[in-house]
Image (spheres, rainbow, N blue to C red):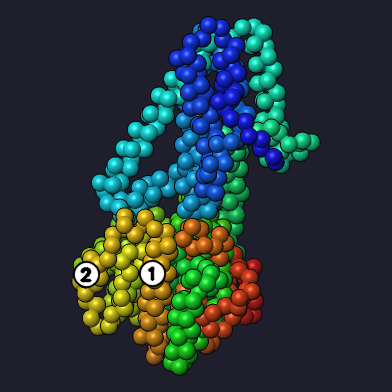
Amino acid sequence: MVVLARPALALAGTAVMTIPHAGLRRTLHLLLAALVLHLVLIQPNHPDAMGWGALSVFPLELPAILLALTTLGQTRVSGPLRAALTFVLCLIVLLKTADFISFSALSRGFNPVADLALVDAFLRLLTGTFGGAAALAAILGAAASLLLLAALIWWATGVWARVNARPVVAGLSGLAAALSGVIAAAEIGQTMGRWTLPFDPPGTAFTARVGVERVEMVQTTLSELRSFRAEAARDPFIDAPGLFDAIDRDVLVIFIESYGRTSFDTPFYAGLHRQTLAGYESRLAGRGLAMRSGYLTSPTRGGQSWLAHATFANGLWVDNQIRYGAALSSGRESLFHHAANSGFRTATVMPQITLDWPEADRMGFETVLVAADLGYRGLPFNWVTMPDQFTLAALDRLLRSGDDTRRLFAQVALVSSHAPWVPVPDIVPWEDIGDGTIFNAVAASGDPPEVVWRDRERVRAQYRLAVDYSLRAVLEYALRHATEPPLMIIVGDHQAAEFIGLDERPDVPIHVIGPEPLVARLTDAAPYPGLRPADDATAMPMDRMRDILLNAYFTQTDTGAVN
């Protein structure tokens, strides 16, 4: 679509010429009011659109708004009309801002139904990264900005509502506004895929399109939720005997935060991460451990790790908060329910959980260990509560030693590679970890996040080091237990935000490490020997993992795999 440059000031100036005896101040007020509305309507909702070119876009909604104000401004509906316009435009600004943040962090638009819970998560991340005072200042600044915006829109609509348009001018303006409305409706329909325009419209109905898209998104989300609930109720593994009977040892499902395919395909990251994996691949093989790798398609990008955890465990595509809640409330048996039914002790180790986590009771875990349970007495690494090496040591201390002889089936979510990625810990001797105070010196070192995050290149360099540390911590753990190895399934939860990861794909690595007979059973999920998948490897959807694991270690060979 070709968008013709038509400055809003010219439009406003034309309208002003029709108003007799208007003084210079009145003219300037009209021009400024039109400019305010113009800027609100052309606000970009995507980082790629944030440029000077956005100022040249002509919003098709502007003539209709000015016509409505000039023709109805002297009537009893003037006040309600201005109030409605102010409310709607402020709401659209909020949606566009949420879109901008969501595209920057998650590489997708904001879903008003599914993403409301992310507001709290965003505020907690802001507080943990930049401190409570900075977060409070940001919240107050945002609230003040919204109030100022509402006041400006109310003033701008009032200026134009006081214009008493002549009937002829009103008729011509009405014809122009009607034409703009028709073009806008046609453009929206074309964008939604319902029809095709036979010409390039002279402008864009971007703001109206955002509103229409959000209405459709809400309707689609609610419809998909009904289908999702029906899918969750279907589970061929209910009461199936022999699940996991082929496993004679502990199973550890370890998620590495923000570990994505970019570690293999983007030269800036691959140069370090591939080298690290190659070195450990040789060392692990020398200790008799088998390894296989591949790629999974994560349901999320840039954040919301819990969606990946739920997708992996439930065998359902959980790509938003609504589906997450539906999966938990459905009664569907997760990977960990089935493990418990097969005689395993089930547990989860979540060092980043610092608040109440009541939904954990529905995930199939017998034991839930959050940050306060792990015994860390060292300094936090800004928003990151503790280093990954301490988390893995706590896993051994709290779950893999003691009198309970049952096999363990645990989920571990590591967090050292979570933003803000400063500072990055060092690997220390396992016997020296203690209560974690050994990490205090490095936790207090280097520039704080508010300094590092002023430079994206520095942020990317820190991210590269943080992921490398997490990989080394996990693989050092595998080496530590090489004599009696658990079955380790190591998975990236999602790619980092695109401006950090430099990769917009949702693919994440999966590594399986352990005894050859057990590792060989997961060829479907990890088709490539070693720790480095083939360059052209295709990714498998993460929601297939639950059923692959259940079938891989199913001993009832007389009935075959469950479908």
The foreground one among 446 and 292 is 446
Q: Please tell me which residue is depicted at 73% across the width and 36% down the height of the picture.
A: 200
Q: Amino acid at mark 1?
A: Ala
Locate residue 377: give its quadrant.
Answer: bottom left
Left or right, 517 with reference to 126: right
Q: Give above or below for 434 relative to 62.
A: below
User: Residue at label 2?
Assistant: 440
User: Residue at label 1?
Assistant: 466
Can the viewer see residue 336? no
Residue 303: x %, y % from top left:
45, 57
The foreground one among 26 and 122 is 26
Q: CA separation, marks 2 and 1? A: 17 Å
Q: Amino acid at mark 2?
A: Asn
Count all numbered tags in the image, as a single digit. 2
Locate residue 392: give its quadrant.
Answer: bottom left
Q: Label 2: state its secondary structure.
A: helix
Can the viewer see residue 272? yes
The foreground one among 246 and 9 is 9
Q: Residue furthest right?
A: 198
Q: Give above or below for 176 relative to 236.
A: above
Question: How packed is label 2: few (under 14 Cα within 10 Å), some, or many (20 or more)?
Answer: some
Q: Residue furthest front?
A: 24
Residue 524 is labelled as none
Residue 539: x %, y % from top left:
61, 68
Q: Please tell me which residue is depicted at 60% across the width and 54% down the height of the picture.
A: 231
Question: How packed is label 1: few (under 14 Cα within 10 Å), some, or many (20 or more)?
Answer: many
Q: Please tell me which residue is depicted at 44% across the width and 89% down the height of the picture.
A: 283
Residue 125: x %, y % from top left:
35, 53
Left or right, 257 with reference to 368: right
The foreground one among 17 and 523 is 17
